[in-house]
Amino acid sequence: MCSCSKNIYTYEKLSEIKDFLTEKISIQPKIGVICGSGLGSLGNAITDAVWINYADIPDFPVSTVEGHVGRFIFGCIRGVPVACMQGRFHYYEGYPLSICAMPVRLMKLFGISHLIASNAAGGLNPKYKVGDIMLQKDHFNLMGLAGLGPHIGPNDSRFGPRFFSMSNAYDEIILTKAKQIVERLNMQDKVHEGIYTCVGGPNYETVADVKALINLGVDAVGMSTVHEVIAARQCGIRCFAFSLITNVCSAEYGVDCTDIHSEAVLEVGKQMQEELQIFVEEVVEAISQDN
Ligand SMILES: O=P(O)(O)O[C@H]1O[C@H](CO)[C@@H](O)[C@H]1O
């Protein structure tokens, strides 16, 4: 499947899906939350929750990756109505980027104004350790340079203009608030601010890949988020994203990185779940106070 194949998730199709879901919920979400690999427990912060499996939504794709439950949770975090995705779609699952990013457009139809995206990522910056958190200051759109994106093909202006700026992709105001939260929660020793990139995957990087990405100024590498943020910015959603560093990538030959596997990635998520849940709760509250 290529990124430019016909996008079946038209405005009309997403409106149908939205209507189907609206009948099952009683809130109007204001913030979208996407849980990264092993970070599904962020959904534990949600009260008055209604769970809807992707498999039960007509014409919806399913999550095929371990660590992605594959359901929406609609409910409240600290009283703020949210739509939370416990499981996202990745390019390497065979979904074009337009489908990977489609839930963001769906959440826009629900009226979300903000997106909080999380991911598991490999640390490229030599200062990063396993279990650290990187607040995304920006991303480097590697797949975009290769001509791949969620918005390739005919443009429906109801999802935003064809040409749009990505200069404030990660909202500076939310990032500043998140950094204040980090200080308040005394997490500053393990939190960094940096640049994320998305590769196609699902294999992890060679040493040459790692060296090249470091030279490009990238601090953490994963296989998601960038296209979600592009779709979000196109339709005017303000974005905040963070990476949990689940492994460090070696830029040296002879360092054994063969223990990088998805179970190890998920395990780090489990270890950090309580701390990250509180962090996300605080960010949601801070965003809601901004409005
Ligand atoms: O980006 P999320 O969904 O957190 O998942 C990350 O973890 C998986 C690799 O272990 C890849 O899917 C990578 O993108």
Image (cartoon, rainbow, N blue to C red):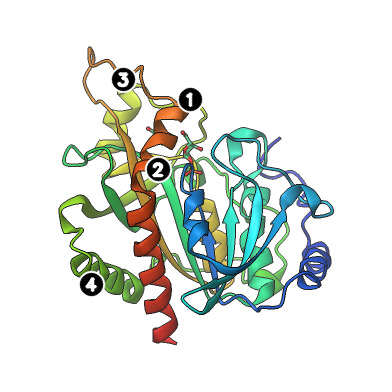
Q: Which residue is mark 1?
A: 203
Determine contact: label 3, label 4, CB under 8 Å: no
Mark 3 and mark 4: span between their CA atoms?
34 Å
Image-based side of 216 in relation to 108, left or right: left
> Residue at (27%, 29%) from the top-left corner?
211
Determine contact: label 4, label 1, CB under 8 Å: no
Of the numbered discs 1 and 3, the one sitting upstream in the chain is 1
Q: Mark 4 Cα within 10 Å, few/some/many (few <14, many 20+)?
A: some
Mark 2 and mark 4: span between their CA atoms?
23 Å
Mark 1 and mark 3: span between their CA atoms?
12 Å
Which mark, by number, is residue 180? 4
Disc 1 residue type (three-letter): Asn
Label 3 element class: loop
Mark 2 and mark 1: span between their CA atoms?
19 Å
Of the numbered discs 3 and 2, the one sitting upstream in the chain is 3
Q: Which residue is mark 2?
A: 269
Q: Mark 3 Cα within 10 Å, few/some/many (few <14, many 20+)?
A: some
Of the numbered discs 4 and 1, the one sitting upstream in the chain is 4
Mark 4 and mark 1: span between their CA atoms?
36 Å
Disc 3 residue type (three-letter): Cys
Which mark, by number, is residue 257? 3
Q: Quadrant of residue 120?
A: top left
Does the image show residue 171?
no
> Residue at (48%, 63%) from the top-left corner?
45
**Which residue is most to the front?**
48
* Above or below, comparing residue 68 to residue 20 in the picture: above
> Residue at (81%, 71%) from the top-left corner?
19
Q: Nearer the viewer, mark 3 or mark 2?
A: 2
